[in-house]
Amino acid sequence: MKPVVDGLKQEYEGKVEFRLIDADNDPQAASLGQKYGISAVPTFVFLNSDGKEASRLLGEQPVKLMREQLDALK
């Protein structure tokens, strides 16, 4: 998924902020996982401009579906 996410980061630069958390190496991973109810990796949580969860996707996803979720954010 990393190549897909890296491509989307470039495509949506200036429009969407991406935050990637390495579940194995990031010291904040456990607290963020608990805050957002993450129980599987990868999990994609899409937050709107108010910081509220707009949607989420679990597991590997096709780039088309990722774009749809990003385009729906407001």
Image: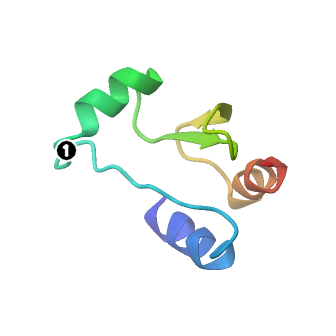
Is residue 25 visible in this depiction of the protein? Answer: yes
Q: Quadrant of residue 38?
A: top left
Q: Name the secondary structure under disc 1.
A: loop
Decide which of 74, 70 is in the foreground and name it: 74
* Residue 60, image x, y percentages: 54, 46
| Residue drawn 20% across the image and 48% down it | 26
| Residue drawn 67% across the image and 39% down it | 50
33 horizontally vs 60: left or right: left
The local crowd at label 1, few if under 14, some if 14 to 19, many if 20 or more residues have their Cα within 10 Å, is few
Label 1 sits on residue:
24
Decide which of 24, 30 is in the foreground and name it: 30
Is residue 39 visible in this depiction of the protein? Answer: no
| Residue drawn 75% across the image and 58% down it | 67
The amino acid type found where label 1 is placed reads Asp
According to the image, what is the colour scheme of the structure? rainbow
Q: Quadrant of residue 32?
A: top left
Whether 14 is drawn above or below 61: the answer is below
15 horizontally vs 21: left or right: right
* Residue 62, image x, y percentages: 68, 54
Whether 17 is drawn above or below 25: the answer is below
